[in-house]
Image (cartoon, grey):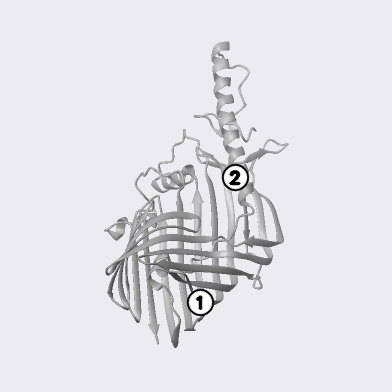
Amino acid sequence: MNRKGCNPGEDLASIGFKPRWAKSSPLVLMSSELRKVGSCWRIGLSLFLNFCLAQGLKAQSVSLPPLSLTSDYFLGQQSSSSTLRFSHERRYFWANNVIALREGSRKTLPPYRVDTSQPFLSGDKFLRWQVRYRRWGFEFAEGTLSLLEGNRDAAQLWLDAKAGSANSHRIYFPFATEQKGHWRWFGLNYLVPFQLHRMEGKFVVGFRYLLCDRFRDGWFSGTYQNGRLLGELEFVSSRGIGFNAPSGKGFALDAASMVGQGKWCVFLAVEGLVGEVRWKWLRKVSAFVDTNAFAQDPDGFIHSLPSLVGREEYLEVKRPVDKQWLAGLGYSHLRWQWILARDERVGKGNWHLSAIWSLRVDQKLYFDLQVPVRAVSLGYSGRNFELLLAISHPDPSKALVLGLQAKLITR
């Protein structure tokens, strides 16, 4: 059985087999063989490229829930205070670029066509308690972050399976990666105001001690045709180790600054400037997948083979922390401030065009347009309360991006 060859319209298991009594002219045979060779060449090249990409992902970094949203850096603009301030914050955020979030939770779907070459699905749930006094800030935060990415074929295969319309004559080449983790951290930060010639600004440096459990990180690469999935997968996970599964422990160093001169100001922030996470041991699985594998024993009986064959091991894992950054330029006029910024969150970059209207000294309204994610954020910041809503469509049932953040402050 040739496991890697295929030809449109044929079952994968039958490639390379031709009865001796088949009656075909030499020209027909040559044409048929050329089609087989061309198809096999395309499949082999695709698998090779996916394999190379998968090898590069083996040493990928770990992504943390964002320490602060882009709006937090624009609206907060921290200052030292002689009074003790407590705050509690909650955030929920979901985003993808394939299908409306509400549609994705349905068991069956109508036929859809994937329009992007880099589909993704991310989810972020986050809460934080923070204490600030003078220039010092201390916080405890907890959250989950999940990120699923793939190529166009992976998303199209998922949609076709949901719609029950997988094309039996089409060969899919799905490739996907997934990372998921539950994070906690204790953080300490310090604010340094400074002045240089006509410029003045603020610099904040922070340190976080990280803990991570319920962690999983892996990838899959393969082919799918006519109900058969064939490929390779690899993942590391803290599940399956037992009740004493170790938590990942690590650190992250963060920095942010805002510098202004006259009506102009510049924002710059990097989360995870330096950092890493270590696990004493994680469960690692490397395997081949074949959902339609059979073998014939010496007596002539056909037996189904396991659909997952590979090895399992336990090993120490160390990963660097993914850098998330923001850079922006702002201009103030009367009670308005306009900001053009670029950020990268969980590997996804966006441009921001923001406007802030100061109602009073301690009250602001916030508007933000984001591309290419095509989402709009609306926010309010007051002395004791902050609220932010992000959405990509006026009708929430059609939104691909949906987020909500609320913060209570007591002094």
Looking at the image, residue 198 lies above or below residue 100? below
Residue at 50% from the left image edge and 81% from the top image edge: 135
- Looking at the picture, which amino acid does disc 2 mark? Leu
Which residue is rendered at x = 53% and y = 77% of the image? 190
**Residue 42 appears at what percent x and percent y?**
56, 31
Q: Are marks 1 and 2 in contact (CB under 8 Å)?
A: no
- Report crowding for label 1: few under 14, some 14 to 19, many 20 or more residues within 10 A (C-alpha): some
Q: Residue at x 32, y 69 (%)?
A: 379
* Most foreground residue, 248 or 382: 382
Identify the residue under disc 1.
191
Task: Using the rendered image of the protein, determine whether residue 232 is visible from the camera's viewpoint.
Answer: yes
Task: Give x and y (percent) for residue 388.
Answer: 35, 69
Packing grade of label 2 (10 A; few <14, some 14-19, many >=20) is: few
Q: Which residue is mark 2?
A: 53
Residue type, mark 1 in image = Leu
Residue 8, above or below 332:
above
Name the quadrant of the C terminus.
bottom left
Q: Quadrant of residue 166?
A: top left
Instruction: Report the side of 388 relative to 173 (left or right).
Output: left
Mark 1–mark 2 distance (CA, rounded to whole Å): 41 Å
Residue 408's disc number: none
Q: Is residue 25 visible?
A: no
In the rendered image, the quadrant that contains the N terminus is: top right
Q: Position of residue 352 (x, y in %)?
A: 38, 57
Mark 2 element type: helix
Q: Position of residue 251 (x, y in %)?
A: 61, 70
| Residue 266: quadrant of the picture | bottom left
Query: Does label 1 or label 2 sit earlier along the sequence?
Result: 2
Viewer-side label of 1, 2: 1
